[in-house]
Image (cartoon, grey):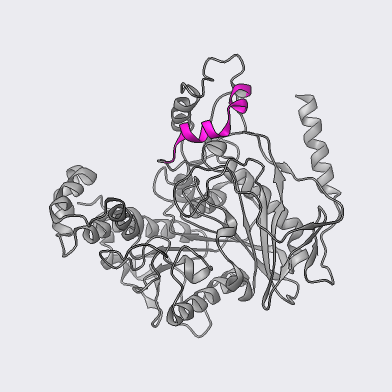
Amino acid sequence: MKKTAAAGLGLALLATFAPAARASPDPSVAVTSQGAVRGTVGPKTRSFQGIPYATAARFAAPRPAAAWTGVRDATRPGKVCAQPAGYPIGKPSTDEDCLNVNVTAPVGARKGLPVVVWIHGGSMMFGMGDLYGPDRLAAGGAVVVSMNYRLGVTSFLTHPSLPESGALALDDQRAALRWVRRNAGAFGGDPRNVTIMGESGGGFAVCGHLASPASAGLFQKAIVQSAPCLTPGSASRTRAAADAESAKVVGHAEVGCATAADVARCLREVPVETLLRVYGSAREPRPVSGTPALPLPVDRALRTGRFHRVPVLVGVNHDEENGMVLGQELATGKPMPAGAYEPAVRKEYGGRADAVLRRYPLGASAGQTLARVRTDAAWSAPTLDTARALSRRTPTRMYEFAERKTPWYAGYPAPSFPAAAQHMAELPYLFDLALFERPTREQAALGDRMIGAWVRFAATGDPDGGGETAWPRLRDRGPRGWHVQSLTSGTWKRADFVRDHAYRFWSTGGK
C-alpha cells in the first residue's frame, strides 16, 4: 500500500511540475505540458489527433501519460478503445492503451476561446472521438476536444478485488478534463471556460459528471443531448446490480476466474477478446453509484439538487425512436405489420397498455406509431422532467430538434417511413459524419445556426442571439415556464411540447 501511494504521489508531482503548455509561432505545432505535437493546418482550422492524456493498467484508474522529447506526430487518430463489433458508430478493437484526445481549433485563434469537450455516445459500449469531425464547430469559434475512453467490460466490470473498476469511463473522462485544464491555452482555449457536451451514452456521462463531486471545477457548462438522466438507472446503477451482472462474466466458463486464488490477477490475464465476447454487446452499462466519486444515483442527485450548479443546455429529438424501429425493419427486411402493433404495446406497457392504445391508436404505419409511443414515454417526457429538475437550481435551457427532412444513413436502403428527427439526427448538423448522407444546402444552413447557438452557449452560458427568436430559460413554475425551443430549418419558436408528447399522460404513469 505504501509503495502504491508513493508511486501515486510521484506521478502527481510529475504532473504538477511538468513543463507548462504554451502557444507556438508555428500553427502546426503546439507545446503541451507533456511535449510538443505537430498536427495539420487547413483553411479554417488546425487539428491535432491521438495525443495521449493518460495511461492505465486493466481495471485500474488512469494515471498521467508520460512526457516525450522532440515533436510528436499528431496527424492521425489514436488507438480506439477495446470494443466488440456491432454498430457503425464504433470500430472493433482489442486495444487497451487507448486514452488519447483530439484537439481542433480555429486558425489564427486568439487566446481565451471557449473550450468544448465532446464525449462520444455509443451506449458506453462503442465509439471513438475521431468519428465526429469537429471542423465546422471549431470554425464557429471554439476549441473542440474529443477523447477515447474505456468502454464496456474494460470500464464497468466489478468485483471486490477490483476496487477502482466500475466507473472507469468517467475516471478517464475526468483525466481528459484535467489534461484540458493544463493544455487548453496551447491551442487558444480558455481553461476556465470549459463546456462538456455529450449525446446519448455521452450525454448520460455528462449527467454523471454533473452529479460527481470528483468532477468539481473541471467544467463550467454542460450540454446534454438525447439523455433523459432523470430516468432511474439511465445514468448510473447500484453496486448490487453491477456485481450481479459482473458475476456472470467472472464466473463464465471461458473466463474461469470466480474460484481463482487471485481473482484480480486472473481477470487481468484473460485475453481481452474473451472478456469482450463473454460480456457481449446487448447491454448499456452505467457507472456504479454509492462511491465517493458518485455518492448518489444520478437521477436522485439531480432531483435533490446535489449536482454542480453550472448552466445546462439539455435537449431531445422529436422522433428519437424512429431510428430504433427502422433499424429493426432493416434487420428483418420488411416493415412492421399492422397486426404486430397492439401485441408490442401490450408486451412493453403491461397494465397500462389499454390506456396507451387509446392515446395512440394505430396509424398508417405500425412502426411509426410504435416509435411515437416509445419516444414520448422513454425520451420526451423524462427529458422535460430532467430539465425541470435542473432548472430549479441552475440556469437551464431546453431544445427539441424537430427538423423533418434529415440526412439518412449513407448506403442504407430508404426507410419505410421518414426517419425525421430520429436518435442521432442532430449530429450531422453539428459534426461532419460519414455515417450520414451529405447534407443539403438547407440542412447545412440549419447546422450553421445550431453551431452558432452551441458556441454562444459555450462562451456565455446562453444560446440566445444570432438573430434567432428569443430563447428564454426554462423555469419550473408551471407549464408556462416550460419553454422548449423547437429547432428546425424554419423560424425557431416555442414547441407545443406538453401537448405534442402527451407529457401529462406519461408524467402520471401513462394512465
Front one among 446 and 69? 69
Give the vertical position of 336 relative to 414 (above or below).
above
List x then y, in percent, for residue 337: 16, 55
Q: Predominant secondary structure in magenta? A: helix
Q: Quadrant of residue 60?
A: top right
Give the vertical position of 500 relative to 224 (above or below).
below
Give the vertical position of 61 relative to 431 (above or below).
above
Numbered marks: total: 0
What residue lies at 55% left-to-right and 77% top-to-bottom? 452
Q: Is residue 358 left or right of residue 192?
A: left
Residue segment shown in magenta: 265-281
What residue lies at 62% left-to-right and 42% top-to-bottom? 95
Residue 280 among those drawn in magenta: yes
Q: Quadrant of residue 221?
A: bottom right
What residue lies at 16% left-to-right and 50% top-to-bottom? 340
Q: Is residue 371 left or right of residue 41?
A: left
What residue lies at 50% left-to-right and 86% top-to-bottom? 467
List x then y, in percent, for residue 283: 42, 41
Front one among 469 and 15? 15
Give the residue furthest to the bottom.
467
Give the vertical position of 321 relative to 133 (above or below).
above
Q: Is residue 478 left or right of residue 157?
A: left
Residue 371 among those drawn in magenta: no
List x then y, in percent, for residue 227: 44, 55
Where, quadrant-wise, is the N terminus in this rendering? top right
List x then y, in percent, for residue 299: 44, 47
